[in-house]
Image (cartoon, helix red, strand yellow):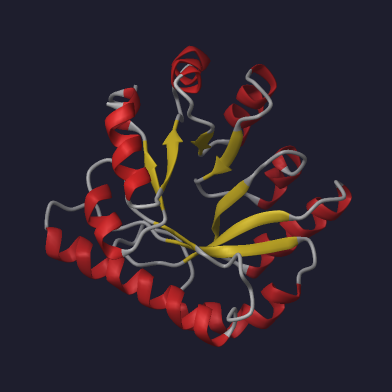
Amino acid sequence: MYTELKNYLSSHQVELVAVSKTKPTSAITELYDQGQRIFGENRVQELVSKHEELPKDIQWHMIGSLQKNKVKYIAPFISLIHSVGSLDLAKTINKEAQKNDRSIDVLLQIKIAQEETKAGYSFENLTSELEELIALEHVDIRGVMGMGTFTSDEEVTIMEFGYLKECFHKLKDKHFSTKKNFTEISMGMSGDYKLAVEAGSTMVRIGSLLFGARY
């Protein structure tokens, strides 16, 4: 499955984030040996533990909600944080990145689903804080991320993905037109990644298709 999926995504110039949360290091090593280098986790403690145990050329992505008091644990090594949905969190990431003498790449999480449980900025709130976000010297905003509604209705999914792409282009045109690396739209998971690719995703987060069901 990995090779087929990787080839499909590569043909569309879409990056694969292998979501390895709850999975043992042995499962990650299997994919690593096939050439996968980007892995996504949603719990800081598990992420830190796996980073310590596994090869150092792995690019770790934080894809889940991130508490401010835990940023310091991943700041030395994290490659990309997908889930920045507040100025307070961004300021904490900036502070911890500065302590580690580095800049941390982030995505701005935009709420695209109707579900109450889904986190992220409303587009209006994001634009009101954007000037302060852009001013953070140790945070590099690379694009946007969104989590669609958990539904079998493809029309809902297509609409939500389309909205995220629209938000990306509004931000790009008005605020990041001169920023060459504002390029990422992180959307799509195991059940809807093809819809996401068709809608313009540049990065999909795939777990169960690669590793099997959670346990």
Q: Position of residue 51 (x, y in %)?
A: 65, 26
Q: Could you say which is closer to the camera, residue 13 or residue 208?
A: 13
Number of on-image labels: 0
Decide if residue 7 is on the left or right side of residue 36.
Answer: left
Quadrant of res 197? bottom left
Query: Residue at 29% across / 61% down in the picture?
Result: 115
Q: Residue 171: x percent and y percent?
A: 51, 79
Q: Is residue 114 visible?
A: no
Examine the rendered structure and indicate whether residue 195 appears above or below residue 26.
Answer: below
Q: Is residue 53 left or right of residue 96?
A: left
Residue at horizontal 25 percent and vertical 60 percent from the top: 198
Q: Nearer the viewer, residue 148 or 31?
A: 31
Q: Quadrant of the N terminus?
A: top left
| Up-down relation of residue 51 to residue 86 (above or below) | above
Q: Residue 13, can we see it?
A: yes
Q: Quadrant of residue 70?
A: top right
Quadrant of the snapshot with the C terminus: top left
State the residue at coordinates (45%, 82%): 170
Depth check, front residue: 88 or 166: 166
Q: Which image quadrant for residue 149?
A: bottom left
Question: In this rendering, is residue 163 above or below 203?
Answer: below
Residue 156, horizontal then vertical, whole percent: 18, 65
Residue sitting at x 45%, y 15%: 30
Name the residue at the front extreme.
11
